[in-house]
Amino acid sequence: MNPKQLSEFFCFLSGENPDLARFELESIILSQGKKIFLEATNDTRIVNIRMQKTMKSVEELYYIQNLIKRATLVHCCCKAYFQVEYKDNQLNDFERLVDSFKSDYIPKLNPSSSFCVRTRRIRNPEGILKQSQITQEITNYFGSKILEQYPSKKVNLKNPEEIYRVIVSKNGLWFGLHVFDSLRKIVRKRTARNRPFFHPSSMNPILQRTLVNLTAIKEGQWLLDPFCGTGGALLEGSRLGFKCVGIEIDRRIVWGAIRNLKSDVETKRLTNLIFGDALHLGFKLGAISAVVTDPPYGTAASTQGYDLSDLLLRFFQEAKAILPPQSRLVISIPSTVDLEDRAAEILNASYRAFHQYVHRSLTRKILVFTLLN
Ligand SMILES: C[S@@+](CC[C@H](N)C(=O)[O-])C[C@H]1O[C@@H](n2cnc3c(N)ncnc32)[C@H](O)[C@@H]1O
């Protein structure tokens, strides 16, 4: 077991799709154009973040906050104090675990502020530590280490000034000061059912915001949703500060989307709607910087008589004519539809594919195309 050199921060990713979560973070960093580096750890749900050495710590925190506030597939971000990574079953009791913490890993802390330690287990680290032991013993261990060094600090479980997090899995242990939560819980509450106009084809706001982030669109640029439905992507895109335009072919749904967008005070000035057809885009090359879309699958939303693959392949041809090199097109389709290679050829793009379980009868495939030069 070799304690690794500290990284600056670590993020605890949501468990539903850690690969997608990492790619979301990478895409936001690309969009913000900051010198922030992600580093994989040997647990897929933890990613280390390193910053440019020249940054002041307030500056660092500001950038990290901007990154975490946008991400939807991250739970929280901590300032890293100690981390150790190990191989399966290399570690089998608590004494051996704490043996690796001999180093002086608790940095200079505020000597008087109240604190608590919260421990979270990722999956069941079976064979490493007994479940009943792990959370309590680790919490107590870290709590007592902090108190040993700072006897005037007070433990406050309900309303602490500082929260120290321990994340433990069968691959390692990470300890640090909790600095930011993502807005995930707030985004989740914006369910499509709470909007003035609801349609069963609406996508959940967490995934909708993830898709917008995956476009890596930059401030001031225009984002297009050519099959915008009730406006979910436009709402999330404009909440993130991007100029958004949506196209919808069904007049009733256009009116519904207008009601949804108007009811949202934060976003109404940044969104535009076109009653039109995604197969006739008519924008000038470069006017749109990225596309995000959740097209109709022919179940809850109509494909207007098209076979889904035909509709999408025609749409990719249209999109190719308006998107500049290096721009991204992000689309979610049912995982049973196999068209990414043909789409990549039409778009002259590279792509990444991620699978996202929705319910028993639907697994979505999220495709992120990046147009080549
Ligand atoms: C799955 S829904 C979009 C859901 C959207 N993300 C939301 O949150 O409401 C797809 C939409 O595409 C629309 N549509 C179908 N064919 C179209 C076309 N050729 N051009 C534009 N919109 C179209 C459908 O009427 C439907 O509202």
Image: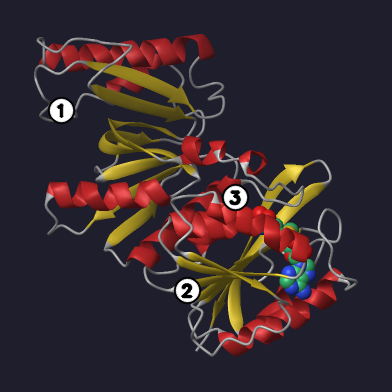
Q: Residue at x 23, y 49 (%)?
A: 62
Q: Residue at x 60, y 52 (%)?
A: 260
Cα separation, mark 3 vs mark 2, equals 20 Å
Q: In this rendering, which labeled residue sits more in front, label 2 or label 1?
A: 2
Image: 215 above or below 113: below
How far across and how far down the image is residue 287, in percent? 49, 84
Residue 275 visible (yes or no): yes
- Give the quarter of the image for residue 242: bottom left
Horizontal arrangement in the rendering, residue 349 relative to residue 280 (left or right): left
**SS class, disc 1:** loop
Cα separation, mark 2 vs mark 1, equals 50 Å
Q: CB atoms at circles 3 and 2 under 8 Å apart? A: no
> Residue 222, labelled with which disc?
2
Give the colour scheme shown: secondary structure
Instruction: Kindly tell me whether mark 2's CB lies below 8 Å from ligand 1.
Output: no
Kind of residue indicated by mark 2: Trp
> Residue 104, labelled with which disc?
1
Of residues 28 and 272, which is closer to you in this image?
A: 272
How far across and how far down the image is residue 356, in percent? 67, 50
How far across and how far down the image is residue 167, in percent? 40, 29
Q: Which residue in the structure is indicated by mark 3?
A: 207
Image: 64 above or below 176: below
Marks 1 and 3, the one that precedes in the sequence: 1
Q: Residue at x 11, y 52 (%)?
A: 56
Horizontal arrangement in the rendering, residue 174 relative to residue 332 (left or right): left
Kind of residue indicated by mark 3: Leu
